[in-house]
Amino acid sequence: MEDTLQPWIEPPPDFPQRVLAAVEREARSTDALPFPWRRLAAGAAAIVAVSAVGFAAGRSTAEGLAHAAGTISPGALVAASLAVLLLGGLIGCTVRLVSR
């Protein structure tokens, strides 16, 4: 059975050399992408700010709960601070992904 729907197409004989030359030319001409230090600094500052606010809120909440229900372990306070830090990081990543 013959394939009459699509004819056989062959590239020109110098096609691989031309593609390789174009790739090499592009590799030599472009500079490396710069690391986004400003974005890193802004994200780190936001995470530190959110965690500081969360730590302060957690501490005041812990003190209020300590008066109401005895004492709260420092481990619970650290866990709450880490949860706020993680949540702040996830919010920052989500905002960056949505803004692209």
Image (spheres, rainbow, N blue to C red):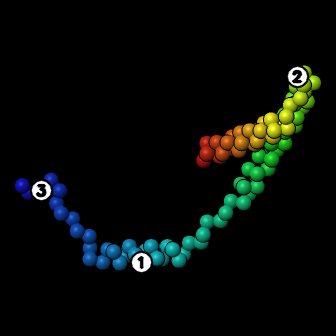
- Give the image location of residue 45, x and y in percent: 79, 50
Position of residue 57 measured from the top left corner of the image (x, y, whole percent): 85, 33
Q: Position of residue 89 (x, y in %)?
A: 71, 44
Characterize the local packing of mark 3: few (<14), some (14-19) or many (20 or more) Cα atoms within 10 angstroms.
few
Q: Amino acid at mark 3?
A: Asp
Q: Nearer the viewer, residue 26 or 97?
A: 97
Q: Which mark is residue 3?
A: 3
**First in sequence: mark 3 vs mark 1:** 3
Q: Quadrant of residue 97?
A: top right
Going by the picture, which residue comes out furthest to the top?
Answer: 68
Say which of marks 3 and 2 sits in front: 2
42 lies left or right of 6: right
Does 6 sit left or right of 39 as displayed? left
Q: Measure the C-alpha gap from mark 2 to mark 1.
A: 74 Å
In whole angstroms, how far apart are the C-alphas of marks 3 and 2? 83 Å
What residue sits right under mark 1 in the picture?
A: 21
Say which residue label 2 marks.
Answer: 69
Q: Amino acid at mark 1?
A: Ala
Q: Is residue 8 visible in the rendered structure shown here?
A: yes
Residues at marks 3 and 1 touching, judged by CB atoms closer than 8 Å: no
Q: Amino acid at mark 2?
A: Ala
Residue at x-position 72% and y-position 55%: 40
Measure the alpha-carbon separation of dots 3 and 1.
Answer: 34 Å
Q: Earlier in the sequence, mark 3 or mark 2?
A: 3
Q: Residue at x 37, y 76 (%)?
A: 18
Indicate the secondary structure of the residue bearing disc 1.
Answer: helix
